[in-house]
Amino acid sequence: MTRVSIITTVQHNVGDDFVREGLLYLLEKQCGRVREQLIHKHLPITARPEFSWIHDQGLDHWFDRKRPGRPTLRLTNTIDRLLPVFPWSDRIRRCDLLLQSGAPIYWAHSIKDCKDNEWWWPLIERRWANKSGGRPFLNLAGGTCQRWGSDGSEFADRPATLAYIRRFFDLATLTTVRDALSVRVLELAGRVAQALPCSSIFAVDRLGIEPAKGEYVALNYMPGGGHYAFGQSIHSHAWEREFVSFARKLAARTKCVLVCHDDKELREAQRLLPELDRFHSRDYVDYLRFYARARWGILNRIHGAFALASLGKPATVVGTDSRAQMTEMIGLRSIFVNQADMAWLEAEAVRLESESDHYARAMDLVKEAAKLQYIGLIKSAIGSIS
């Protein structure tokens, strides 16, 4: 059995869970059964199994306290630096294969950028670089997180960031990305990688979840349309008004359910549309079962749309940053939140309803082609390990 250590998030974002499950599905096609060891990237000390309880008990913020107006005081990283790495138990040192799973990996904003992340030094530089012993390191399904419409030029005048991106690429045995902007960023760093659909489309295959007859339309609302504004003039109040009006009008003629990926979205759904049904769970698998029973969806959550698509259900993403445009890889539409007015939403609902009967066939072709490409690249990179 192949022991795979995965740099991911744990009980943090269901989209990350979908990506990871999809990658495990692809790895199992090449390696057979795998034993996964999860490392919560926002808490690198979880590479040490004896410290996993900090995250399991929800004590991350108690240890790594945020001080007003100052950076996070990362006590856990200090503890990790002071302790030796124990090769017989450490999840990075004790694995057959290391996997960096999905997520935005290339980003550059006003002060910080991707080279400043909290996990690279403790997990890769300290534990992996010069200590891999020839074991493979796969960096799969990563992407960007930039302003809407970015052409990547913001990376061009950051030589230290481009040096980090090159080192990340060169230390990995294989890199694939999930959006065209990531390809451009790598080109600026002098590197080339294959762009493939996000691996989240294979999560349902690993978990054995089949599409069911559509019972409702899945709607998802995030304040401002996404996590980040990045200095863009986001019309948050207008998006709230347009979404609520659209949801009420749609619900008057068909069953709609508000799907909430976190507690904040649940509170907003209760506040804005208390009359509509809501779905929320602590188990990411429940979300995939929920999406399996939908007909189609309009969502701010990108991986909600990918989950629907993976089950043959069409969807559209209303977003604020470059992540939304990874939908192009699977034939879905995305739109900048400021452009998503009532008229556009109504027209999109008509289009999605009309596609709900035949999108599955097109998506099957996308998935099959992507699966063959992923498995071929993985096989070339790692061969057969056990």
Image: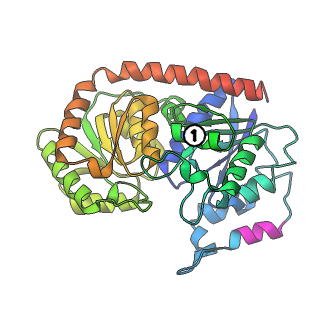
Residue 179 seen anywhere in this rendered image of the structure: no
Residue 49's quadrant in the figure?
Answer: bottom right
Amino acid tagged 1? Arg
Point out the image quarter for the N terminus.
top right
User: What segment is highlighted magenta in the picture?
Assistant: 77-83
Q: Residue at x 38, y 35 (%)?
A: 308
Residue 346: x and y in percent read 18, 40
Residue extending farthest to the front is 157
Secondary element type, mark 1: helix
Q: Residues within 10 Å of mark 1 (few under 14, many from 20)?
A: some
User: In the visual, does 354 lie left or right of 82?
Assistant: left
Horizontal side of residue 103 vs 227, given as left or right: right
264 or 137, nearer to the observer: 137
The answer to if 80 sits in the magenta stretch is yes
- Whether residue 153 is visible here, answered yes or no, is yes
Asked if 357 appears above or below 37 in the picture, the reply is above
Residue that carries the numbered disc 1 in the rendered image: 184
Q: How is the image coloured?
A: rainbow
Image-based side of 100 in relation to 228, left or right: right
Q: For residue 293: magenta?
A: no
> What percent of the width, then of the height, locates residue 285?
47, 42
Residue closer to the observer: 371 or 295: 371
Residue 3 found in image quarter: top right
Give whichever of 282, 157 is nearer the camera.
Answer: 157
Picture residue at 37% right of the left edge, 33% below the top: 332
Q: Is residue 235 above or below residue 383?
A: below
Residue at left 58%, top 78%?
A: 70
